[in-house]
Image (cartoon, helix red, strand yellow):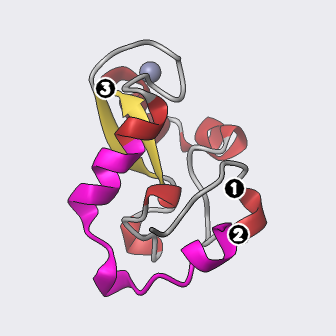
Amino acid sequence: MTQSFFKVPKEKCDPQTERDWCHARCGHVCERCGMRRSVHAHHVLLRKHGGSDLAANLKALCDECHREVHAAPGDAYREGFLRRRFPKPGDFHYEESTE
Ligand SMILES: [Zn+2]
Ligand SMILES: [Zn+2]
């Protein structure tokens, strides 16, 4: 459940696992351009803004998209690749499990 997903204490979250999971979710396809490329885990809410390493806060982006998202944050906010604050659980439409 998304609800309980957000209650996972930060210390229980393993960044590497979350990244792997994020990549597995998208099938190693960039979530922005849809190209099958090597993808990075991008933080939708930046860590310096309190974003977590949980997969719900990660998007798999290829090199190019990752650069563009950070180069043009205005577009990225509109497209949902960046957030200004921690989102409400309902903002995520994919189904997560904490297990
Ligand atoms: Zn891309
Ligand atoms: Zn990023």
Q: Which residue is mark 3?
A: 63
Q: Estimate the x, y position of residue 44 in percent, counting from the top left.
A: 51, 54
Query: Is 30 on the left-hand or right-hand side of 13?
Result: right
If you read the primary sequence from the N terminus, does the residue marked by circle 3 or circle 2 appear first? 3
Left or right of residue 72, residue 38 in this image: left
Find disc 2 in the rendering and name its residue: 89
Label 3: state its secondary structure.
Answer: helix
Picture residue at 55% right of the left edge, 43% below the top: 73
- Residue type pointed to by label 2: Pro
Q: Are marks 3 and 2 in contact (CB under 8 Å)?
A: no
> Quick check: is the Cβ at mark 3 less than 8 Å away from ligand 1?
yes
Query: Which residues make up the magenta segment?
Result: 1-22
> Residue 23: x and y, percent?
36, 38
Helix, strand, or loop for circle 1?
loop
The residue indicated by pointer 1 is 92
Three-letter amino acid code at the position of disc 3: Asp
Among the two numbered marks 3 and 1 on one chain, the one whose residue lies closer to the N terminus:
3
Taking 41 as reference, is 68 above or below it?
above
Residue 91 to residue 9: above or below? above
Look at the image and say whether residue 2 sits in the magenta stretch: yes
- The residue lying toward the viewer, choosing from 63 and 28, is 28
